Amino acid sequence: MLDSKYYDKLNRLRLALRNKSAMNMSGNRKSVMKGSSAEFSDFREYIQGDDIRRIDWNAYARLDRLYIKEYMEEKESVISIFIDTSASMCYGINSKEEMAKKITCALSYIALNSMDRVILYDIKNMDKPYRVTSGKRGYMELIKWVDNLDFSGSADLYEAVRKRKGNGTGLSIIISDFLYEDFIAEEKGKDTLDKIISFLNYNRQQVVLIQVLSGEELDINMTGTYNLIDMESDEKIKVSMNQQVIDKYMEALNGLINKIKKSALKGGAFYSLVNADWEFDKIIFEGLKDIYDI
């Protein structure tokens, strides 16, 4: 899903976590506590960029494969990624769906490379989260899971997030176009976004909102009369596209974007708008640079 050259670049990145619980410590990061736990926990396969001093050479001699020793202190915080799999994400020549998948895989790789635990949520199937710890094999299975996601139908992001399970400090990343009627509604939209962020904050989560929109949604070039079909409800509407209609659409879209920004600022969340037509380098290394600690 990602070109091999990206993995070398991603190895230099770490997701920034303001708070760590005493039970989920530092991994590849510097610990927030003095000293180091010597209590052995588990082995995992070596990933490029790991500290070679932690390789178990005895295991290598027996198995001819590189393994890393993990200790209790090295169990990192949980990185939860909520993926909007509603039908609207399929829109665009460069689809929002494909961009959401690529961002999910890139951020998962960064987390796993730091020995964080990753939980992926398909928001239409919150009762079946996908959990992975670390290791090359685990990441390859994660790619397959992401690639097989079904983007169809409708979903309720607020109700999905409320079904999140798990305790402890962590990072929650929502990848969505946020094109929900509840969000677009003048007052209700702001309330719903505030509730999502507040719920996650209450559960000791740092919140990252990544809004993925297609180039066609951000720059309207349609003229004439069209029969438009809602991708999720199949509702049909006939629209004559002229400058007045385009201006009204852009006003509503910018209103939604500003609403999300304000809710993020109020709740201490990070927000980034992603154009699915952009180069992936620009998105990962520029647009999301503020969520990394190096």
Image (cartoon, helix red, strand yellow):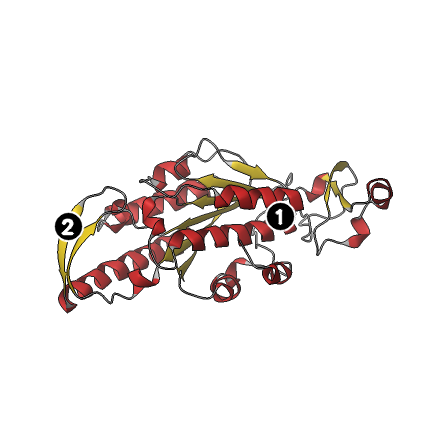
What residue is pinned by disc 1?
A: 112
Q: Nearer the viewer, mark 2 or mark 1?
A: 2
* Disc sitting over residue 59 in the figure: none
Residue 204 visible at all: no
- Please indicate whether residue 107 sits to the left or right of residue 29 in the image: left
For marks 2 and 1, give the CA distance.
45 Å
Q: In the figure, residue 200 lies in which quadrant? A: top left
Residue 162 visible at all: yes
Q: Nearer the viewer, residue 77 or 267?
A: 77
- Please indicate whether residue 77 sits to the left or right of residue 55 in the image: left
Q: Nearer the viewer, residue 256 or 206?
A: 256
Who's the residue at 19% across and 44% down the image? 235
* Disc sitting over residue 237 in the figure: 2
Q: Amino acid at mark 2?
A: Ile
- In the rendered image, residue 90, in percent from the top left (x then y), is placed at 35, 50
- Please indicate whether residue 16 sits to the left or right of residue 193 in the image: right
- Please indicate whether residue 264 sits to the left or right of residue 70 in the image: left
Q: In the figure, residue 292 lies in which quadrant? A: bottom right
Q: Secondary structure at mark 2?
A: strand
Q: Amino acid at mark 1?
A: Leu
Up-down: is 50 above or below 43?
below
- In the rendered image, residue 27, in percent from the top left (x then y), is placed at 68, 48
